Amino acid sequence: MPHEWDSAEYVSKWIEDGDKTDPERAEQITALVGLIQRSAEESIEVLDLGAGYGIVTREIFTAYPNAQVVCLDGSAEMLKHGKARLADLENQLSFIVASFDSPNWLATLPANRQFDAVVSSRAIHHVVDDRKQALYKEIFQLLKPGGCFVNHDLVRKPDDPIRDNHDPFGTVEDQVVWLENIGFIDVECFWQTEGRALFGGYKSW
Ligand SMILES: C[S@@+](CC[C@H](N)C(=O)[O-])C[C@H]1O[C@@H](n2cnc3c(N)ncnc32)[C@H](O)[C@@H]1O
C-alpha cells in the first residue's frame, strides 16, 4: 500500500506504530550513529535524509551534543512532528521540505554546504534504483573529506522478485557495489536481517 506522507492522520498513526514494527530499530539507529566515528565534542555537520519525526537526529545529538543537523524530508507533516519533538535543540537544527526523487533537492541546501555525515533511515528505498544511484553520487559530492554516508533501510532479499514500484528493489549487495563505484571507501554492510540492512561508506581524507 502506498504511503500517505502528506496526510496528518496517516503520519500520526505511522509514528505511533512505527517503532513497534521493528524490535531492533532503536539498537540499529544507535549503531548507525556509532558509524560516524568522530569525537563526541566535535561540532559535526550532519544531513538526515528523509528525517521524518527526527528519531535519527535525536540520536545524533545524544552522541554529538554540539552537532548541527539539517533534517530534510518530502513531507511537511512529518517535519512538523520533527520540529515539535526536537524543539529543545532548535538552535542547532534546520528543516527543509524537499523531495530527493530528483536532483532539485540539492538547490534547497545553502550554497557550498558540506557535511561530515549524511544519515538516513528507512527513506531512500522509496526511490527507484536508478535514482538511488544518482542520489548516492549527490551525497558523495556533499561530503567533506573523511565524511561518511550511513543508511539503515529496507532492501530486497536476494531471492525476492521485484513486484511493483513500492518494492525496495536493490539488494544490499547491489548497493554496496554502487557505493564503491562512486568512490566511497571502507564500504560495508554492517548489519542485515530479513529485508533490512545497515550499510554505508566513507569519503577519503
Ligand atoms: C518510513 S519514514 C522514516 C522516517 C525516519 N527516517 C525514521 O526512521 O523514522 C520515511 C520518510 O521518508 C520520507 N520520504 C519518502 N520519500 C521521500 C523523498 N522522495 N524525498 C524526501 N523524503 C522522502 C517520508 O516523507 C518519510 O518521512
Image (cartoon, rainbow, N blue to C red):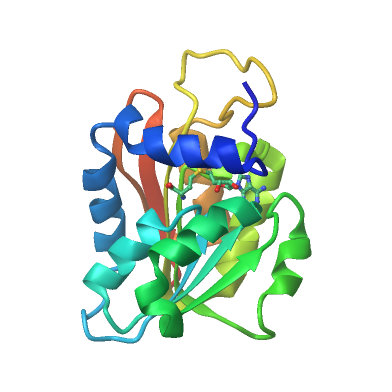
Front-lying residue, 44 or 186: 44
Q: Is residue 34 left or right of residue 198?
A: left
Front-lying residue, 145 or 1: 1
Picture coordinates of residue 19, whole percent (x, y): 33, 37
Q: Is residue 160 left or right of residue 164?
A: left
Q: Residue at x 41, y 72 (%)?
A: 87
**In the rendered image, is residue 188 in sight?**
yes
Please, which residue is most extreme toward the front here?
Answer: 9
Q: Residue at x 43, y 41 (%)?
A: 15
**In the rendered image, is residue 186 in sight?**
no
The quadrant the N terminus occupies is top right
Q: Residue at x 69, y 85 (%)?
A: 111
Q: Quadrant of residue 162?
A: top right
Disc tally is: 0
Picture coordinates of residue 13, whole percent (x, y): 47, 35
The quadrant the C terminus occupies is bottom left
Q: Residue at x 37, y 55 (%)?
A: 55
Q: Quadrant of residue 153?
A: top left
Does 88 appear above or below 195? below
Q: Quadrant of residue 150?
A: bottom left
Q: Is residue 7 left or right of residue 30?
A: right
Picture coordinates of residue 161, whole percent (x, y): 57, 13
